Image: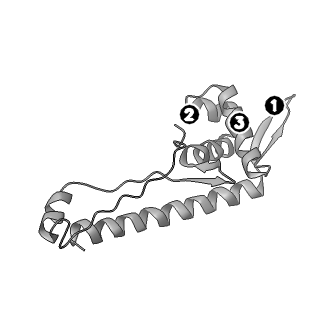
Amino acid sequence: MDAPRRPLRRVALSCGRRGLSPFAAREYANGMEPHSKLWLEQNGKLALSDYRVRLLRLIDETGSLSEAAAAMQLSYRRAWGKLREIEQNLGLKLVETAVGGAGGGGSRLTAEGRQLIERYEQFRIAAEQDVAKQFARVFERGA
């Protein structure tokens, strides 16, 4: 599913004098865990998201846009459109394709495509760690 295109709202929970007491914050967090949804935009256009990176990764793993689309339960046309949209929004060629024939065609990520998804994954992991750290600071320790 695509990331929503709406302005981000920042929500803050304050603990202490005017917010939850540290004890109440810990009790409130009992059994909860943080989650976040990330995406990157370039010039106001959606460039990368977990969904898009998954499509790129599957193309590279399977060597086929068609197989990647099937794995994500997408039509070939939708997957092709997403790929084209990503490349246009980033201004980069991310996938190389070979036309079919006796040996069959195929698709694979360009070096830039592989580097981009590796960096996105590094960013996603770091963001998840930061979210978990802030959750612990605010809810579990009562900031």
Please name the residue that numbered disc 1 is placed on. Answer: 104
Q: Earlier in the sequence, mark 2 or mark 1?
A: 2
- Which of the numbered marks, if any, corresponds to residue 64? 3
Q: Nearer the viewer, mark 1 or mark 3?
A: 3
The alpha-carbon separation of the residues under discs 2 and 1 comes to 22 Å
Q: Residues within 10 Å of mark 2 (few under 14, many from 20)?
A: few
From the image, which quarter does the C terminus lie in? bottom left
Q: Residues within 10 Å of mark 1 (few under 14, many from 20)?
A: few
For label 2, the SS is loop
Apparent side of residue 71 relative to residue 30 in the rendered image (left or right): right
Residue at 15%, 69% in the rendered image: 21
Q: Earlier in the sequence, mark 1 or mark 3?
A: 3
User: Count the marks: how many?
Assistant: 3
Q: Nearer the viewer, mark 3 or mark 2?
A: 2
Q: Position of residue 118 (x, y in %)?
A: 62, 60
The alpha-carbon separation of the residues under discs 3 and 2 comes to 13 Å
- Which of the numbered marks, if any, corresponds to residue 72? 2
Q: Which of the two residues, 11 or 131, is positioned nearer the viewer here?
A: 11
Is 66 rendered above or below residue 35? above
Q: Position of residue 142 (x, y in %)?
A: 21, 71
